[in-house]
Amino acid sequence: MKELNKKDIKTLALSSLGGTLEFYDFIIFFFFANYISKNFFPANLSDFWSLFNTYGIFAAGYLARPLGGIIMAHFGDKAGRKNMFMLSILLMAIPTFALAFLPGFDTLGYFCIVLLILIRIAQGVAIGGELPGAWVFVYEHAASSKRRTSLGVLTASVVAGILLGSVVFLIVNQIYTQEELFEWAWRVPFFLGGIFGIISVYLRRFLTETPVFEQMKQEESLEKFPLKEVLKTAKKGVFISMLITWVLTGFVVVMVLTLPNFIAKILSINPIEQSYLQMLAIILVSLSCVLSGVLADKIGVFKSCVIFAVGFGISSVFCFSALYTQNANFILVVACYLLTCCFGGLTNFCPIMMNEVFDAKIKFSGLSFSYNIAYAISGGITPQLALALHTLALQNLDNFWRFSLGIYIIFLAFLTLFCAFLFKKINNTPHTYSV
């Protein structure tokens, strides 16, 4: 494939920016979970169960992802990648606006919880088609020697959506008092999210269809039922894609979203300091995603994936050993946590591997089906699992169980290694889903 020209660079930039804004809409719910739990659940619930239920509703968005992902991917493989971009952003912007104005428990009672779940389901449907479509879109636009790097840039941009959420969280905490935030100001970020959605819809008007899809369309080689072909000919691709998605899910939900909150409570740091820590971690993860893509283009997927998996596993041991102990040291905990985030680029091997184990005519469907099913399962249980393991660790700081959450994260490092070896074996074996 030709090298990127100015038009291609503009297209990829707009795609990445759109992904940043849409992922902000999906993830901002997590940052304001405490405020949402106070407004949408009965006052007599304990803080643990109120927050646990809020995390559960957050997870409902993950459970809804397969519906949107499978449907949008089907038409993305048949009608084009670009068309699905416009649909996914609309499905995200509308419910985000709705949440900004949704009355709480004092007004609607338990009905507000039902509406809150429906909003998260709508957002899950939207994001289910967004990210797989973006990965395929960028991969097919990029020059063959820069595809993995391009995916790294896109993944970094999506992670930047979390950074944008952190920045907004920090700003509203500086502008409003905690009383104002609990009463009404928590709604401001969701209103902004709706505005971001409108901006994304406008930006995506300038996207062009991928040359790969245009060529398949001219050759009339498009599949009538792409998912059927995926399940028939690409079972190994589906398997490895689901495993590596599990890694991505665990890292994002635990290391990026929940662990800064746990660290803040253990070290008794305020929400502002927590936001700074989370922002720095996200920046390191984003840079690591780009680096992993560059290395994958230079030395190959297998070698670079092993490097990141080993680094992540070793640094995780130090991180959780320093955190879950009596009188945890602030500097040591923060240093070890940020070091672990430096290996967050292992999440970029998720789109890299998935793009390279499916043929172009079933790529969107294969990638989206595998990714969203796996994300629905792992993302649906990981927030509650992380909270439960964190609670268990705090109750057993003087014995083995203080490593409970750390064991899960180290397991993800070993799972990444397994995926690297499996990917190498698949790529060296003749198959029908050639890249």
Image (cartoon, helix red, strand yellow):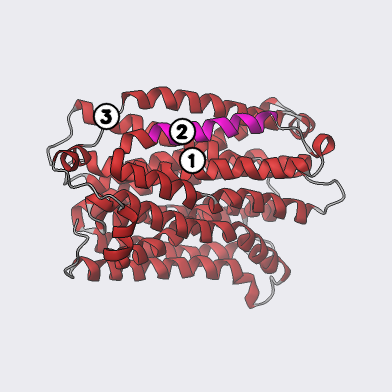
The N terminus lies in quadrant = top left
The C terminus lies in quadrant = bottom left
Answer above or below: position of 281 versus 10. below
Is 224 positioned to the left or the right of 215 in the image?
Answer: right
Q: Which residues are magenta?
A: 85-101
Label 1, label 2: how far apart the Cα atoms are: 7 Å
Name the quadrant containing residue 192. top right
Is 330 positioned to the left or the right of 67 in the image?
Answer: right
Q: Are marks 1 and 2 in contact (CB under 8 Å)?
A: yes
Q: Are marks 1 and 3 in contact (CB under 8 Å)?
A: no
Estimate the x, y position of residue 197 in percent, counting from the top left: 50, 28
Label 1, label 3: how far apart the Cα atoms are: 20 Å
Estimate the x, y position of residue 100 in percent, counting from the top left: 66, 30
201 and 336: which one is in front? 201
Q: Amino acid at mark 1?
A: Ala
Name the quadrant containing residue 407. bottom right
Is 312 positioned to the left or the right of 6 in the image?
Answer: right
Answer above or below: position of 38 versus 371. above
Query: Which of marks 2 and 1 precedes in the sequence?
Result: 2
Residue to which mark 3 is pinned: 208
Tag count: 3
